[in-house]
């Protein structure tokens, strides 16, 4: 995983804080699809018959009157779809200037360094959005550090909680 500096993490945290204020949506209480809608992004779930290795993808608009679209692989578990949607929203928010119309995600990063960094940023965005720091600290305190309980509470997988904890230790 590419290294994100403290500045990178703080920049993304600030963006998320602004989006929370702008949309009035915070997690895990909020609905992520409603949050996407509030940002002007359309969300679809479909079967990826020829591309079942793909978790989801972002289609950026080519004209100013079009909206961005995120497609999720219908066959993935709920927690995975949720994380993928948050990850694609991360690309939409953080990498808008990118010239690419399509960004496919199968969570296997083998691109160049710049692309790997973008993937890491999108993962950090997703984890920070879905697992806010103060709420995570409360849950871990209440559950005596039980990661399974935290994962269930936030509706994400265990590795997402583990990475979030790792990132919070860096971001001090
Ligand atoms: Zn990605």
Image (cartoon, rainbow, N blue to C red):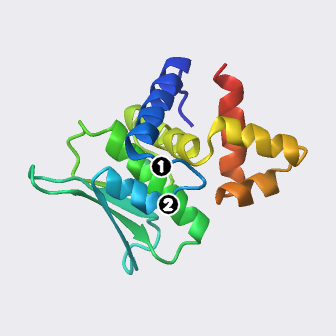
Q: Position of residue 140 (x, y in %)?
A: 82, 43
Location of the N terminus by quadrant is top right
Q: Position of residue 100 (x, y in %)?
A: 23, 47
For mark 2, does the 10 Å Cα neighbourhood hold few (<14), some (14 to 19), or many (20 or more) residues?
A: few
Q: Residue at x 39, y 37 (%)?
A: 112
Q: Are marks 2 and 1 in contact (CB under 8 Å)?
A: yes
Frontmost residue, 33 versus 84: 33
Residue 110 appears in the figure: yes
Q: Residue at x 20, y 42 (%)?
A: 99
Q: Position of residue 83 (x, y in %)?
A: 54, 56
Frontmost residue, 22 versus 46: 22
Q: Residue at x 51, y 54 (%)?
A: 107
Mark 1 — residue? Answer: 25
Q: Secondary structure at mark 1?
A: loop
Describe residue 101's horizontal placement relative to residue 172 as left or right.
left
Q: Residue furthest right?
A: 144
Mark 2 — residue? Answer: 31
Image vertical order of residue 156 relative to residue 113, above or below? below
The picture quadrant where one finds residue 135 is top right
């Amino acid at each position: 995983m590419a290294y994100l500096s403290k500045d990178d993490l703080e920049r993304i945290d600030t963006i998320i804080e602004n989006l929370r204020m702008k949309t009035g949506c915070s997690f895990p209480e909020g609905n992520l699809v409603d949050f996407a809608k509030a940002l002007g992004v359309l969300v679809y779930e479909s079967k990826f018959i020829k591309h079942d290795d793909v978790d989801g993808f972002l289609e950026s608009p080519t004209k100013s009157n079009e909206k961005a679209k995120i497609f999720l692989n219908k066959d993935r578990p709920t927690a995975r779809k949720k994380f993928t949607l948050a990850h694609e929203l991360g690309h939409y928010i953080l990498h808008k200037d990118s010239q690419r119309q399509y960004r496919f995600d199968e969570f296997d990063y083998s691109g160049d360094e710049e692309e790997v960094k973008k993937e890491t940023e999108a993962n950090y965005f997703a984890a920070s959005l879905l697992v806010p720091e103060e709420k995570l600290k409360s849950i871990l305190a209440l559950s005596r550090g039980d990661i399974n309980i935290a994962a269930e509470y936030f509706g994400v997988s265990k590795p997402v909680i583990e990475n979030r904890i790792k990132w919070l230790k860096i971001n001090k």
